[in-house]
Image (tube, rainbow, N blue to C red):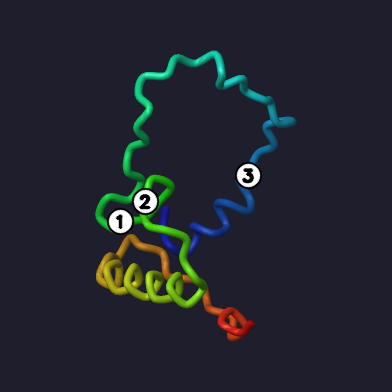
Amino acid sequence: MTIINLSSDHEVRNAWLGPAFPLDLSTLPVRTEELPSQYQTLKLGYSATTPSLTVEQRLKLGDRVEGILADDKEAAPAPARDDTTTQS
């Protein structure tokens, strides 16, 4: 698969799998109460221990993540920011 046909692959070759099927996760055994770190290198994710962040703090973190991933050829570029993001 090349970069040229990557997006068309998701548009043309998509398949319908039917309606969603609910899963009862309460029947699964609990092996640990501790959640694993989702993004260990970035110190972010569902298991991060940071307190709630303001929009400005989130934007700064986003800039930091972009800097970390800037040289990673497989990392997707960040979406364009809306200028109204920082307005209250």
Question: What residue is drawn where x is 35% and y is 71%?
Answer: 66
**SS under mark 2:** loop
| Disc assigned to residue 14 | 3
**Mark 1: few, some, or many residues within 10 Å (few <14, many ≥20)?**
few
Identify whether 6 is placed above or below 37.
below
Instruction: Assign a secondary structure to mark 3.
Output: loop
Closest to the observer, 57 or 7: 57
- Residue 9, labelled with which disc? none
Can you name the residue that lies furthest to the front here?
Answer: 51
Q: Earlier in the sequence, mark 2 or mark 1?
A: 1
Residue linked to disc 1: 43
Near-viewer residue (74 or 48): 48
Residues at circles 2 and 1 in contact by the CB criterion of under 8 Å = yes
- Between disc 3 and disc 1, the foreground one is 1
Q: Residue at x 56, y 82 (%)?
A: 86
Closer to the camera in the image, 81 or 74: 81
Q: Which residue type does callout 2 highlight? A: Ala
Residue in front for this viewpoint, 77 or 57:
57
Q: Residues within 10 Å of mark 2 (few under 14, many from 20)?
A: some
Binning the other alpha carbons within 10 Å of mark 3 as few (below 14), some (14 to 19) or many (20 upward) gives few
Name the residue beneath numbered marker 2: 48
Amino acid type, label 3: Asn
Image point (40%, 51%), residue name: 45
Q: Position of residue 73 (x, y in %)?
A: 30, 65
Please, which residue is most extreme toward the right here? 19
Q: CA distance from mark 2 to mark 1?
A: 6 Å
Task: Label 1: state its secondary structure.
Answer: loop
Three-letter residue code for mark 1: Lys
Q: Earlier in the sequence, mark 3 or mark 1?
A: 3
Q: CA distance from mark 3 to mark 1?
A: 34 Å
